[in-house]
Amino acid sequence: MERIFFYIFALIIIVFALASVMSHKILRAVVYLLFSLLGVAALYFMMEYNFLGAVQMAVYAGGIIILFIFSVLLVHHIEGELEEPTFTRKVLMGLASLIGFGAVMSVILTHNFITVDVPRASTEVSEIGKGLLSYGEGGFILPFEVISILLLAAMIGAIIISKSSKKG
Amino acid sequence: MIANVSIYEILTLTTLLFFIGLYGFLTRKNLITMLMSIELLLNASVINFVVINKYMFPEMLQGVYFSIFIIAVAAAETALAISIIINLYRLKVSVDVNETETMKY
């Protein structure tokens, strides 16, 4: 049963990702990307990382896709068509991607991953929060604080960069 | 782990997603669509972190922390890049990579 659902979600992710990188209409490409990211969130829910799935839906579907749609509407016409890449470019880049895919897959399939099936750790939000804020061994307090500074810097930077400079 | 689904199937899925994103990044010429391809690349790597955490070290949560950090960095990067793109559009009236040749206006 889980296997069938996994393959359905995998199909959704791959098909919409392909549609997103190949679509000629830019707004449609953004919406295809949204469906692909929602499929990824479904994978997280299947792996019982509920918090991560919720973050994926809130940040990507709620935040980043909205940003993309706003920027598309500010920069293009709503029916904006993209310039088609030349045929040789498509073939060459597709070939390069296929070669890369083959190389990575050959490494993955020959490597023996030792999977274990012990009872999982608690993935409650409280456990994740405790781990993020712990000072002890395996704690993530320093990266957590660095990320908070980074988000503040990105926010200020975005405001300053996109503020229209009248004199410029 | 997901019942009856091996780690190889999920890693195949993420590799495929990564190279679809790479193909999009190499063929697109519009800055916004290139940014969307980068989102696909980042997502594929985040799934890898989560899957390896889940299948090989299920008693720990380190992969989840790294995924949260990657998602936060991706959000910050997207916000900054879109503000740069909108500013570039004001200066050049185009968001094509071929049009943006100079770094200073």
Image (cartoon, coloured by chain):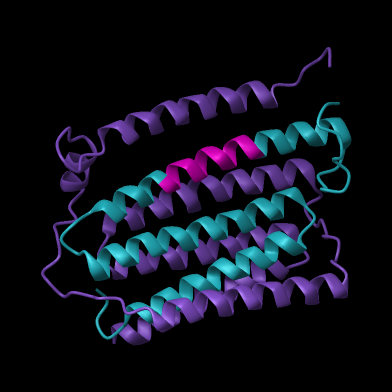
The x and y percentages for residue A108 are 43, 77
A44 drawn magenta: no
Looking at the image, residue A163 sits to the left or right of residue A37; the answer is right
Q: Which tint was used for chain B?
A: cyan
x 61%, y 73%: residue: A100
Tell me which corner region of the image, top left, top right, bottom left or bottom right, holds residue A23: bottom right
**Near-viewer residue (A99 or A36):** A99
Q: Which tint was used for chain A?
A: purple
**Near-viewer residue (A143 or B3):** A143
The x and y percentages for residue A143 are 34, 35
Q: Please tell me whether residue A168 is drawn above or below residue A90 in the rendered image.
A: above
Tell me which corner region of the image, top left, top right, bottom left or bottom right, holds residue B39: bottom right
Q: Please tell me whether residue A107 is drawn above or below residue B84 in the rendered image.
A: below
User: Main structural element of the magenta stretch: helix, strand or loop?
Assistant: helix
Most distant residue in the left direction = A119
Looking at the image, residue B70 sits to the left or right of residue A67; the answer is left
x 16%, y 47%: residue: A127
Highlighted magenta segment, given as a residue range: B70-81
**Near-viewer residue (B31 or A25):** B31
Quadrant including the C terminus of chain B = top right
The x and y percentages for residue A8 are 44, 82
Q: Please tell me whether residue A92 is drawn above or below residue A40 in the rendered image.
A: below
